[in-house]
Image (cartoon, coloured by chain):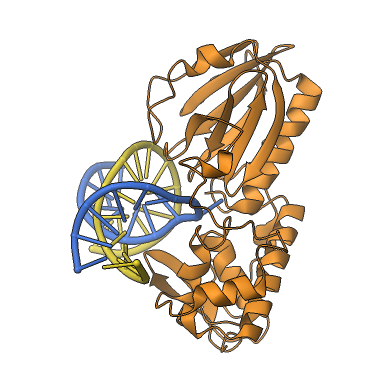
Chain colours: A orange, B yellow, C blue
Amino acid sequence: MPELPEVETVRNGLKEIFNSSGSLVETASRSQKALRFPWPRNFCKELSGQSILNVRRRAKYLIFETTGKDFISHLGMTGNWRLESQESPKKAHDHLRLGLGNGKVLIYNDVRRFGFFDFVDSEGLEESRWFSHLGPEPLDEQKFSPDYLFCNSRKKQTTLKSFIMDQRIVVGVGNIYASEALFRAGLRPTQKAGRLTRQACVNLIVAIREILTEAIAQGGTTIKDFKTAGGGEGYFQQKLMVYGRDGESCHVCGYGIRKKTLAGRSTFWCSQCQNG
DNA sequence: ATTTTCTCCTGCATGC
DNA sequence: TGCATGCAGGAGAAAA
């Protein structure tokens, strides 16, 4: 569900919650159902009584730094956090409840249970099983450079869209923003990644950065399930140029938006605007 | 080795 | 109305 801008939006919401409602986890309880992976051993026991010191993000992972063990939260497709008062009715697919005091409770809900939690060691996080294969952050101008993208795309037979969704190449770009970034860069999602010119790499990197930055500013994209940690919706869907618009006309040239499945994921583009 | 398809899960839209 | 089918923003495993 959430790509980088959505995870960043959730992170911002969680930080606000911990600032206003306190960061001490007085109580913790969880559902009996496993998420994508079994719950970490003694997860709730380890959490209760600890304070959340900070919430960071790497790729699409949230990293909770606490006075006890640090842990990560991955939202999968439908994971979301919300703050409610203790007496609010429970909802289907609530999986974790963190009592924050003042009658407030922070709840993790995940319909499809593709999300998961795990304890991590903050030292050496980049070398951990979850992070060791990850590429650079797209907003890191040093590491995610045109030269990096050009060199790593050489001889790649995969499609350009699959290439930029490969978390080993660059993290955070999911199915929506991949199509949107390629539209902005004027590049065909179906072309071979190995065909990228140096100039195309420059254009693509700029497009990815702009799309993600604007989406963060808009609070992410709410197509179906995404909710900010405050329970609100993101507004970037109002700016989508191609995603979910097959059969409609291009906002720029009026040509019909096309749709095709690439590597199992729906892909949208304008064959007039994206001829590079 | 690289690339695509399958799989985990539930809910919703669509079509017969 | 009911039922079958397909699809959904992730991503690792399995298969090609």
Number of numbered discs overlaid on the protein picture: 0
**Which of the 4 image quadrants contains residue A28?**
top right
Is residue A23 positioned above or below A192 on the image?
Answer: above
Q: Nearer the viewer, residue A127 or A226?
A: A127
**Which of the 4 image quadrants contains residue A125?**
top right
Q: Is residue C5 left or right of residue A168?
A: left
What residue sits 69% from the left and 45% below the top? Answer: A9
Q: Position of residue A122 (x, y in %)?
A: 61, 33
What residue sits 62% from the left and 84% below the top? Answer: A198
Is residue A138 positioned above or below A276 on the image?
Answer: above
Outermost right residue: A20
Q: Position of residue A90 (x, y in %)?
A: 53, 20
Q: Nearer the viewer, residue A18 or B13?
A: A18
**Which of the 4 image quadrants contains residue C15?**
bottom left
Q: Is residue A103 visible?
A: yes
Q: Nearer the viewer, residue A167 or B5?
A: A167
Q: Is residue A266 left or right of residue A96?
A: left
Q: Is residue A251 visible?
A: no
Is residue A4 positioned above or below A61 on the image?
Answer: below
Q: Position of residue A168 (x, y in %)?
A: 50, 59
What residue sits 70% from the left and 12% below the top? Answer: A103
What residue sits 61% from the left and 76% below the top? Answer: A183
Q: Is residue A120 left or right of residue A112?
A: right
Locate the C terminus of chain A and report the quarter of the image it occupies: bottom right
